[in-house]
Structures are given as C-alpha cells and as structure tokens.
Amino acid sequence: MSDFDYDFVIIGGGPAGRRAAIQASKLGKAVAIVDDQKKIGGVSVHTGTLPSKTIRESVLSVTGWRDQYFKSGRQRDGADATRDSISSRLSTTLGDEVEVIDSQLSRNNITTLKGKAKFASPNKLAVSQTVQGKKISYSVTAEKFLIAVGTKPYRPKQIPFNGTTILDSDCIAANMPMPKSIIIIGGGVIGLEYATIFSTLEIPVTVVEARENILEFIDRDIVSNFSHQLSERGISLRLGRSVDKITLDKEDHPQVQLDDGRQLRADMLLFTAGRVGAVDGLGLDKIGVFPDNRGRLTVDPKTLQTTQPHVYAAGDIIGFPSLASTSMEQGRLAACHAFNHPIHSSEHSFPLGIYSIPEIASIGLSEEDARAKGLQVEIGLARFQETSRGHILGNCKGLLKCIFDLNDRKLLGVHIVGEGATELIHIGQAVLNLNGGIDYLSDTVFNFPTLAEAYKVAALDAYNRMPQPKLRA
Ligand SMILES: Cc1cc2nc3c(=O)[nH]c(=O)nc-3n(C[C@H](O)[C@H](O)[C@H](O)COP(=O)(O)OP(=O)(O)OC[C@H]3O[C@@H](n4cnc5c(N)ncnc54)[C@H](O)[C@@H]3O)c2cc1C
Ligand SMILES: NC(=O)c1ccc[n+]([C@@H]2O[C@H](COP(=O)([O-])OP(=O)(O)OC[C@H]3O[C@@H](n4cnc5c(N)ncnc54)[C@H](O)[C@@H]3O)[C@@H](O)[C@H]2O)c1
C-alpha cells in the first residue's frame, strides 16, 4: 500500500458503494466505506427499493389480492393489524439484508466507517459522527475515492412537510401510514408504486402529475393497459396539472390548490416529485468537482471518473437511470477502472422494472421509439388470458408486447404489464442482447402452463403477419 490509509475510500454504503468495495477488495486493495446512517445499506435497503417492495408484498398478502378472482370479496384486516403485519415483515426482511451485507463486507476485509464524510483536500476526507451527544471527527486518506452518496427526496421549501399528514417516501418506509384517503403529487415511478399499494388497501387515491402522460419512457400500449386497470380500481389520475399551493387545514389535513383552480382534500399527502443528489456538506469545492442544479455529478460514462481523475462517482448521484440494479454495475465498473482491471464493457440494454400493482417491465425499444428511428416493425401481442397459467392464477389482465424488426426478424423490444412482469422480462433481455429474434421465440418450446409461454404467443402473433423466413439449406 502507498502512503495513504487506504487504496480506495468509498462514500456511501448503497448498492454502488458496496459493489465497488467488494470488487476493489477482490483485486487486493485496501478498502473502506464511509456511511452516515446507523446501518449499512443505503436508500436501497432502508428507505427505497427494499422497503417499498416488502410493503408491496406484504399488502398483496394481507389483502389476498392475488386470490381475489376466486373469492367473492377481498379480505381486509383492520388498519392496525395491517400496519403490524407490514412492519413485522419489514423488520425481518431489512434485518436479514443488513446481516448479509455486513457479513459480505467483513468476509472481504472491507472497513466500514460510520459518519458523514467531507472532502478536506483531494486525497483526504474529514469524517464526523455524533456519539452520545458528542461530535467526533477524524480524517482518512486514500489514493482513490468513489462518491456513491445517492439521493434524497426533493422537498420544496413552500410545502409544509410534517411527517404525519404531508410526507415524502422516506417517511413511509419508517412507518407505514394507513390514511382514509391520500393525494400523491408526482406520478413517476415512486408515486405510482405507492398509489397502487394504497389502492390495494382500498384507500382512495388521487395522483397529480404535471405531465400530460404517465411513464413517458414506457411503450404506450402498456401504459394504456396499466392506466385502464388503475381507473377500473378507482385511482384518480389528474394529468397535466400542477400544484399552486399546498396547505394544512385546522385538523392538519392537506389541501391542494391545482393550477386549474380546483381544490383537492385528503387525509394525507405523499410528495413524490423527484429526488436530488445528496451532495450537501460533501466539500466538493475542495476538490473542484461541481454538481448540477439537482445535485448530480457528471462523469465520463465509460470510466465513471469525475473531472478529478482519482475521484469516481456511481449510482444515483450520476443521474439516469437511478436504479439499484444499474448502480451496482456502475460501482463495480468504477472499481475495475480505478485499479486497471480489464472489463468486458457491455453495450447491452438493461431492463426497467416498476413494482406497481400490476408490475410493468420493459427492455429495448418501444414501438414509438422504433418507428421514430425509421425502423419497419411488426408487433406481437399476447394477453395473459391466452395462457393457461393466467387462468390458473386468476390473473388475466396482463399483456406482453414484442417488437420485431421486419427486415432482419430480430427482437427490438419487449414490454410487459401484469403479474411477474419484472421476472418475465429477463427472457426478452437474453434473446434481445444475444441478437435473437422471432424465429427463436416462435420455434421454442416453453414449459406449460407458464406465463413465459406468452412470449411464444406474441411471437406467433407477429409471425403470422411477417414474410416467411428464408429456409436454411
Ligand atoms: C421508494 C424507492 C423505491 C425504489 N425502488 C427501486 C426498485 O424497485 N428497483 C431498483 O432497481 N431501484 C429502485 N430504487 C432506486 C434505488 O434505491 C437506488 O437506485 C439506489 O439505492 C442507489 O444506490 P446508491 O449506491 O447510488 O446510493 P444509496 O442507496 O442512495 O446510498 C447512499 C448512502 O450514502 C450515504 N451518504 C450520503 N452522503 C454521505 C456522506 N457525506 N458521508 C457518508 N455517507 C453519506 C447515505 O446516507 C446512504 O446511506 C428505488 C428508490 C426509492 C426511493
Ligand atoms: N422500480 C424501480 O425501479 C424504481 C422504483 C422507485 C423509484 N425508482 C427510482 O427513483 C427515482 C425517483 O423517482 P420519483 O418517482 O420520485 O421521481 P421521477 O422524477 O421519476 O418522477 C417524478 C414525477 O413527478 C412529476 N412532478 C414533478 N413536479 C411535480 C409537481 N409540482 N406536480 C405534479 N407532478 C410533478 C414529474 O413530472 C415526474 O413524472 C426514479 O427515477 C427511479 O429511477 C425506481
């Protein structure tokens, strides 16, 4: 090791930081992670991905949602019993996850330092922590750094957040609320995931979204199927509407004044209109690295280096796509580049998974994107009602859509709404990234009865309209 305390110091113990740390340690480097939370894991484990997915699974289970087709009415425990089930499942799941992470880090000899890190100079961090009311500070030096500090909810000053009736998504993970009605501001991924979770609990939901459409990055047929399912369930979507003012009434209930003059009232308001980079107090000015107006850092997309070559950044702090899945890979790639480990650089498409109820998943081009690129395409559709598995599950509202290139018959994109979409998408991912196409999907035998069979149904749907392939000699 050099004159520094460590070869690599990582700020942030979320998915990007952890993967980077393990990769660097496997390359024989001395590594430390500094994280300012009580437990390691980041937003992904404590307030974001895992809590929201655990709450979702718990709500599906306590409401008997998956069995509703075969039952005359859905069961619904009282609010207290439901909250208890959710919090007990959260505590088990998140506790187990932290144990696994701690064990992985210690097996790989990675030092974990608790406290808030701040650059004091290009190779030195000041770390401060408050223990029993006393502020403790120390410094750590390293040859290279990774900034993996993630994001925090965007909280405009004029909104009277109070943690009980006006909340952001971090508050939900800490204590699942059970309001009588809820307004959600921002129909992005977080807003829609929670909108469908509350609606599954039969809580009336209104979503206010400033854009004219929700989920603009998803294929329109899938969004239209999804929106239809939301409206059937009574979720009210106020699209193209922005908020003029949010106030609290005498009972502390939120009142929302929309730009069209209408007023909305509910028991509770969840504000999910985006997130900002957690760069406050990081001392970036000391190293000459400057965030954009949403607190995000710019990196070289191939190497993940900031404008300071020895300082890397990965995960949500570098912006799109801001997923745990992509953050992990960025962290690993940053560590490989930092320590000259050759990487198999992949230009492969990555999947998107939205854990609303029902799920949405997507990979590759949407029909709109493919047509905008001037590609000639054929579309294959499969409704889950055309699969026996869909009937066995009593869940037939799903739709799988494949987009094929009419000229070379290759798969260009797959888009799914329905049960299991986030798992099913990986079949499409493999075929697409391995340059497969309609002939593979239409000739392949799938297990029966499965939802995966929908790939064959969709492929044959398109196949029947496409010119015959040239037969091999
Ligand atoms: C509600 C919600 C649901 C989500 N669901 C999904 C999903 O289903 N699938 C998916 O792929 N992604 C999902 N995401 C996104 C996912 O959580 C993020 O992409 C991921 O957590 C980003 O990881 P990261 O490593 O960049 O940092 P983070 O997980 O944000 O962790 C950063 C850590 O750094 C710490 N830190 C910050 N500043 C400092 C400092 N100065 N010193 C020390 N420590 C510091 C933070 O406290 C935190 O512990 C969701 C996010 C939210 C909010
Ligand atoms: N399943 C998943 O992979 C998953 C789940 C949740 C979150 N995430 C990640 O977290 C990130 C943040 O999610 P998010 O939903 O908070 O942000 P977002 O930026 O995706 O969505 C915010 C939405 O709020 C709308 N909006 C902004 N200001 C508004 C206003 N004043 N009134 C009404 N609408 C307004 C925006 O138009 C946008 O549609 C996502 O980009 C995603 O990467 C991923």
Image (cartoon, helix red, strand yellow):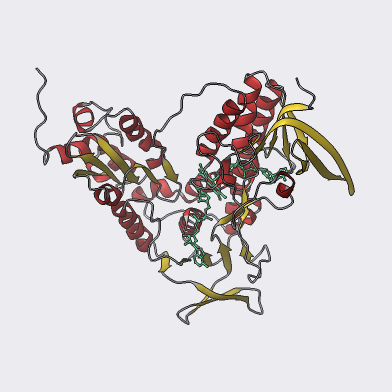
Question: Residue 54 at what x, y percent from top left?
Answer: 55, 44
Q: Is residue 429 left or right of residue 370?
A: right
Q: Is residue 93 left or right of residue 342?
A: right
For residue 232, what is the image quadrant? bottom left
Residue 282 visible within the image: no
Question: Residue 330 at what x, y percent from top left?
Answer: 54, 35
Question: Residue 142 at what x, y percent from top left?
Answer: 75, 31
**In the image, what residue occupies the spot 26% across and 41% down?**
402
Q: Is residue 292 left or right of residue 381?
A: right
Q: Is residue 455 left or right of residue 89?
A: left
Quarter of the image with the N terminus is top right
Quick check: 162 above or below 257? Answer: above
Residue 383 visible within the image: yes
Question: Residue 279 at what x, y percent from top left?
Answer: 67, 50
**In the image, what residue occupies the spot 66% across and 79% down?**
250
Q: Residue furthest bottom?
A: 261
Quarter of the image with the C terminus is top left
Q: Nearer the viewer, residue 379 or 143?
A: 143
